[in-house]
Image (cartoon, helix red, strand yellow):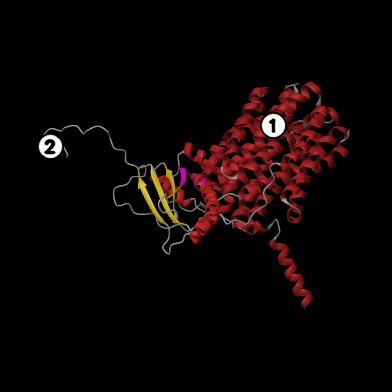
Amino acid sequence: MRLGIRRLKEFKSVDQGSPFQPLANPTFRNLWLWVTVSNLGTTIQSIGAAWLMTTISSQAEMVALVQTATTLPIMLFSLAAGAISDNFDRRTVMLTAQCFMFVVSVILAILGYLGGVSPWLLLLFTFLIGSGTALYNPAWQSSLGDFMPREQLPAAVSLNSIAFNLMRSIGPAIGGSIVAVAGAAAAFAANAASYVGLIVQLFRLKPAQAAATLPPEHLGPAMSAGLRYVFMSPNVGAILLRSLILGFSTVSIQALLPLVARDLIGGGPVHYGTLLGSFGAGAIVAGLFGHRLRRRISSESYMRLTHMGAAFAVGTLPFAGSLWLAMPIMMVGGAAWLLAFSFCNMSVQLSTPRWVVGRALAAYQTAAFGGMAVGSWFWGFLAERYGVEVSLQIAAVLILVGTLVGFWLRMPELSGLNLNPAASRPAPKPSFDLKARSGPVVVMIEYAINEEDVPAFLAVMRERRRIRRRNGAHAWTLKRDVEVGRFWIETYHLPNWIEYLRHNQRTTQADADVTRRLRELHSLSEPPRIRRLVVRPVSAHRPKRVAGLSEMP
């Protein structure tokens, strides 16, 4: 009996840490299944585009530009897409992106059947599909937190990666067979068909986001707010820089893989699809067991291990010589790829509050895919001049050099900060007519601090300053009363009244903990005094006389 109870407890413990736990959520499960089908279509389309380019162009640089055309839109448009996903209904954003990609894929398939696809036209349509992906990804990934608890986000991110790489595992073989039997146009048609199920599911999905109490931000200010948050958050900034370097160096194995299959192994589209499938298979295995590794070693050690795996795969692939030797090497590369990038994605989500998570993920994608876009061109450029073997060996060395960056910018440990919105007080009711655009708004908070608490107070205020500026305030200052030294005044400005209300709504539970520490240092029984003021410019000119009215005194 005791043994049975113990096994039951062990089973529950394993189940709670299982990467499949989010599938119990029906909303996530249905979307995830159709996203998986869409990923299959995307993989088939990539196979068709890459192999079609090898048949209509003999330049290695043009072949590598297919990967650039796929990733460049994500670098260019992700931040705007993240701002849109944070301010509008994410279901509508995802639906718009899917419909756009469906239309583009249908047109590309028709042109392919008619034989009217030139190298630059192929790059254009690949770029357009990538643009739809750029709009879709931040909304999809940031929507995970709308219908599942925060503690399941790591498993959900892993499942997304597993789904993508599962389709990458079987998709290339399917795509290679389709291209070999029916041509690239059939691959483009299959991609168009893969969008239909997800479009239908999104039409049926009820909006998951809570109703907004404030109007959406304009695109420009929303993008600025996202960038400000990233730059004022050291953890997120470190993740983005590491992702940029990793994307630039590791994309070499994917950008040059068609040339490896054709020139170093002497195969065709099926060989290329098989190698890419091996890459995906390694990623799937890593996705299933990677969470156990994360629990045993530090974040930085985890990243260094993934770098070494990627460097091994990139450096040894040119010497494989046959498909059977290249397949296990590609599996190692796929495992390292998934472990590194899913960990970066997860770290961004767990380090970012809900109000800006779409923009933070978009900034991460901009960094990672920006590195991939530039890297795809760069490695193709090198391969054109020095050969595929030399290019991959240089890339392997660069990956190893990337591990040295960890001594300067270490990956943050996944903290337990509570980034849920703080229970803020009701907005103050103005005593006069105050419009949303009235401003600037000046906030003054007065503290009474005993002399022995001044060092601790200043230390907390340094964190307070970063939080204020990160959430949108500017001109932050801290002043001390000359006559009564225990009185300190914190002052900061916001552009207008609506931005003041947004600033308050952006406060998280972790931010509120800083407020609690300040109030503990406050020496008076009543709380710190808060004054909110609206700047009213006064004209230096006297008012004009108006007929029938006497001049105001």
- Judge by depth and name the residue closer to the eye, 224 or 92: 224
Query: Where residue 152 sits in the image (x, y, percent)?
Result: 64, 57
Q: Which residue is the extreme one toward the left?
A: 548
- Judge by depth and name the residue closer to the eye, 164 or 346: 346
Q: Comparing marks 1 and 2, which lies closer to the viewer?
A: 2
Mark 1, Cα crowd under 10 Å, few <14 / some 14-19 / many 20+, is many
Spatial CA distance of label 1 from label 2 is 75 Å
User: Which residue type carries mark 1?
Assistant: Gln
Residue that carries the numbered disc 1 in the rendered image: 67
Q: Is residue 414 left or right of residue 420?
A: right
Q: Answer above or below: position of 466 versus 540.
A: below
Position of the N terminus, as image quadrant, is bottom right
In the rendered image, residue 150 lying in the magenta stretch gets the answer no
Per the rendered image, the range of residues in magenta is 470-478
- Judge by depth and name the residue closer to the eye, 105 or 10: 10
Which residue: 70% across, 41% down?
Answer: 408
Query: Where residue 256 sits in the image (x, y, percent)?
Result: 77, 30
Q: Is residue 482 left or right of residue 393?
A: left
Position of the C terminus, as image quadrant, is top left
Residue 204, visible in the rendered structure: no
Mark 2, Cα crowd under 10 Å, few <14 / some 14-19 / many 20+, is few
Quadrant of residue 171 within the rendered picture: top right
